[in-house]
Amino acid sequence: METFDPAELPELLKLYYRRLFPYAQYYRWLNYGGVTKNYFQHREFSFTLKDDIYIRYQSFNNQSDLEKEMQKMNPYKIDIGAVYSHRPNQHNTVKLGAFQAQEKELVFDIDMTDYDDVRRCCSSADICSKCWTLMTMAIHIIDRALKEDFGFKHRLWVYSGRRGVHCWVCDESVRKLSSAVRSGIVEYLSLVKGGQDVKKKVHLSEKIHPFVRKSINIIKKYFEDYALVDQDILENKESWDKILALVPETIHEKLQQNFQKHHNSLQRWEYLKKTISSQDNTKNDKCGPWLEWEIMLQYCFPRLDINVSKGINHLLKSPFSVHPKTGRISVPIDVQKVDQFDPFTVPTISSICRELDTISTNEGKRNEAESDIKHRTRDYKKTSLAPYIKVFEQFLENLDKSRKGELLKKSDLQKDF
Ligand SMILES: [Zn+2]
């Protein structure tokens, strides 16, 4: 098991920001090809320093300015904010009201703590391999909708470093969306509604929307292993009472009696499905196949933090920032391989710094004469951070391709005139 000692964090961060942080790729991302003037320079960064000292409205001139400041400040956490009308670090010099957030990626934040009423293995900040499937399903469902229903091309999924995932949608047109449109999108993607006091959080209409149907199809692939075996959601009276609260009272007694006769969640779920479908729909319009889907959705459907997505000026933890409690790096997730993604194997700052130490010792003084820049570009490649940076580079590649395609289209249009 990986050990991480938070007391060592300041020293580890120094090494990380000096030799491992992928500045070039990071700048390449947020500069977006340099197409819009001052896009990078007007971006807000916020740093959380030692002892929770929080500094907003940081901004940088270029990659080397960013590098210098990060190495100087040694932030425990980095957040990314909006692109503003003016340089954020000069916001005090601008006339009141003139300093406005103008653009930002559309972001999503999914946190395991929001599932505490439906996961039985852990609670609050804890996660395990059993409940991580919730994040896997969430990524599949949201990513499919963003791609197919909205046509968004550039989606970067990132592990938060502890108990959740983030998504950054970076298409040029998406970065310009208003708050109202962002709200509409996140509303479309939300099915589980109501706080702690609301028992039944999913209500389907009789006509199932294609988005809902496609989401259910994704959940179906995981439901048996995840909900019935791992979470064992019908294990005992206490757990099945929660499910009874989601179905009409008319069938409570029948289910209650027969649940006792069956041996496990799998059998009980089969019985529940049979009972629902055997109800006479003409007499009891509350019992239809959607009842089964409502339960599945309540237990498995992604729960988004709506406020994070709505606001243009909302900050979100940056990719490649370190989680100060776990020491894990916020690494990009390869959506093609999301089923194999294991948060417990994500490198920690101490593990990659140790890998670097080992290399340095092996290589001896041979490299000492080489420049710092040469060091940096190759250093992360020698650590277990490398595959995650590759995922990030693939994402940047696609952004570049789109941009070049757009430029070509524009120049072709000009030729036509
Ligand atoms: Zn768990």
Image: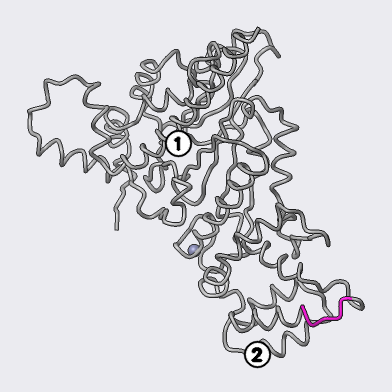
> What is the quadrant of residue 185 in the picture?
top right
Q: CA distance from mark 2 to mark 1?
A: 48 Å
Asked if residue 106 lies left or right of residue 184, the reply is left
- Quarter of the picture containing the N terminus is bottom left
Of labels 2 and 1, earlier in sequence is 2
Tell me: residue 224, above or below residue 77: below
Which of the two residues, 39 or 244, is positioned nearer the viewer here? 39
Instruction: State the mark number for residue 412.
Output: none
Q: Give left or right: position of 411 versus 183.
A: left
The quarter of the displayed image where residue 193 is located:
bottom right
Q: Position of residue 286 (x, y in %)?
A: 85, 71
What is the secondary structure assignment of the residue under circle 1?
Answer: loop
Which residue matches tag 1? 319
- The amino acid type, in three-letter code, at marker 2 is Gln
For residue 352, above or below residue 56: below
Q: Which residue is mark 2?
A: 260
Q: How is the image coloured?
A: one colour
Magenta span dominant secondary structure? loop
- Residue 153, x across and y down, in percent: 57, 35
Q: Residue furthest bottom?
A: 261
What is the crowding at mark 2: few (fewer than 14 residues within 10 Å), some, or many (at least 20)? Answer: few
Which residue is situated farthest in the left direction here? 365
Q: Nearer the viewer, residue 153 or 377?
A: 153
Identified by mark 1, the residue type is Pro
Residue closest to the eye, 365 or 73: 365
Which region shows up in magenta?
277-281
Residue at 51% across / 60% down in the picture? 133
The residue sitting at 70% across, 50% down in the picture is: 190
Q: Residue furthest right?
A: 283
- Which percent across, then down, holds residue 383? 25, 41
From the top left corner, tell me how far across and down residue 312 is, in percent. 65, 29
**Disc 2 element:** helix
